[in-house]
Amino acid sequence: MYGTAAAAGALRRIWAGVRLGIRRVLRAWRRSLLFRVVAGTLVLSVLVLVLVGQLVLTGVRDGLVDAKVAASLARAEVGFESARTQLTSEQASSADVGQLLTQVVTDLRNQAGRTDLYEIVLMPPPATDTSTPAGRGLRTTGVGVNTIPEELVRALSERPEQTISRFVALCYGEPGEPCPEPGRDAGPGLAVGKQLRLGTGSYQLYFVFPLTEEAKTVSLVRGRLILGGAAMTLLLAAIAFLVARSVVRPVQSAAKVAERLAAGRLSERMTEKGEDELARLASSFNEMASALARQIRQLEDLSRLQRRFVSDVSHELRTPLTTIRMAADVLHSAREDFAPPVARSAELMHTQVERFEAMLTELLEISRFDAGAAVLEPDPVDLRDVVRRVVEAVEPIATEQYSTRFRLDLPDTECIAEVDTRRIERIVRNLLFNALEHGEGRDVLVRVAADETAVALAVRDYGVGLRPGEASLAFNRFWRADPSRARRSGGTGLGLSISREDARLHGGWLQAWGEPRAGAQFRLTVPRIAGTVLTTSPLPLEPPDRHVVPPLPAEPETGEDLQRAGRGPDV
């Protein structure tokens, strides 16, 4: 039991090591151009060398074997003819059969000249005639009877007039005895057999040509090909490494310089060496970096000038606006004493002064964010109470001007977070007015949720929605989803931008989702404790009812329609 558990633990460790190695290789493949070039060259080189080596080895082996087979068949035919002549001579009729067979094998063995040129096997066929004299049997010179396969013996018995050859596995034993260890070969060989007649009987004569020298030659060639292929692969890998490194190094240098430029170090440049393509690349990159640096500095100067202009103008307009506001309030409070045209003018002036003051407040707030002067004053607040207060304040406008209702989905438990109440109320108010502007009169859903680390607020409308790519543009300054569409409330287009800055000041998120004709949802997520880093939100960014769009509200019925239905006032 202990051994099984230990083996399983060892296998798990081995598998973990293999997976770690695979992950490292894949990470190196993704991140390193040099590794991909060298590894790709190495793999392709191995495949090509294996293919070429296999072709060469096959050609050498086939050539050696074909030459050996041709020479062996020619030598065997000479031996068969010699044995036939000896067995049909006049002396053969009066000689002892055993001595004659031994003499034939001995003479054929002596004709070889070399003891390793071939071996002789002389044996009766498997179905020997009854006329075959008793005692006549196997004669062999070295190889055992198991060297001759049964299929060759049967084929030669069925076709006694033909010379048949087969590749065999050599099995050596004592002369005249079967191989002591059947099935254990000493190398490949070629057996060439022919059936000969002796008087009224017949015998099968086999020449067994060893192919050990050819096998050694093929093995030697294979070994040399493997060594040469390995050396060639290493050489190609080294060449690929050197070539790729000479190309990749400038690219790596350009990537590092680009990263430093992106980090704001605009003085970084590539080193220019030589006059080749890489040197021209470095020169062009440096020229591009210089042009980008000039443009960035110009834009920074222009941005600073613009922010300063907006801040100065906003502050300068504050004093005359206060005087105008006071005068407008006086006229508005006394409008009932004026003639109707003058009273109407006083109302319009009061409304536009309020609008201008709101716009000026937004510009001042943007100036504070740009200057880094915005300050957060957090207090523990239940976001449900904030939502209720803002909805109660905006609901009359939603009902009278937009014919829209707010639906609240608030949890029963408290959703307390350390936030700046004024800024959170401004975010909620901006999100509600944005939903009213684009909701096309349909209901607006407001949801609040909380978990252990964060509190989230989502405002969902079912209006025109957002086209692909517009969710990230919705928070840009002065950006509008449909500039041609008439707006009821007006504004500077800074509301969502200020809201995102307020969310960031809290360390939170303000995100948008939308689809054309499916509405949009804006989600605010803030940490429960100020300074905590957010990782998740209690509410999904994409609403669960993303494919459900309620119908447009019915048009209000006129007095004539009510009378026709019997519900109108009596006349």
Image: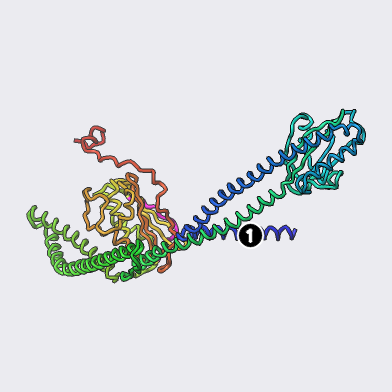
**Along the horizontal axis of the image, is 541 left or right of 362?**
right
Q: Residue at x 66, y 52 (%)?
A: 219
Asked if residue 304 is positioned above or below residue 171 in the image, the reply reads: below
282, 1: nearer the viewer: 282
**x then y, percent, for residue 225:** 60, 54
| Badge 1 amino acid | Ile
Residue 460 visible in the picture: no
Residue 338 image point, x, y percent: 8, 57
The x and y percentages for residue 85 are 81, 34
Image quadrant of residue 355?
bottom left
Q: Is residue 69 above or below residue 429?
A: above
What residue would you read off at disc 1?
Answer: 14
- The residue at the point 18 percent across, 61 percent down is 356
Relative to 142, is 420 on the left or the right? left
Q: Is residue 51 visible in the rendered structure shown here?
A: yes
Q: How many marks?
A: 1
Quadrant of the image for the N terminus?
bottom right
Foreground of the two, 414 or 87: 87
- Image: magenta residue range: 406-417
Q: In terms of depth relative to the viewer, which is nearer, 52 or 319? A: 52
Q: Secondary structure at mark 1?
A: helix
- Pointer 1: residues within 10 angstroms few (<14), some, or many (20+)? few
Q: What scheme was used to colour the molecule?
A: rainbow
> Taking 341 as reference, is 382 left or right?
right
In the displayed orientation, state which residue is furthest to the front. Answer: 90
Q: Position of residue 143 (x, y in %)?
A: 81, 45
Query: Is residue 555 in the magenta section?
Result: no
- The image quarter containing residue 350 is bottom left
Specify the farthest residue to the left: 339
444 shown above or below 427: above
Q: Quadrant of residue 531?
A: bottom left
Location of the C terminus (image quadrant): top left
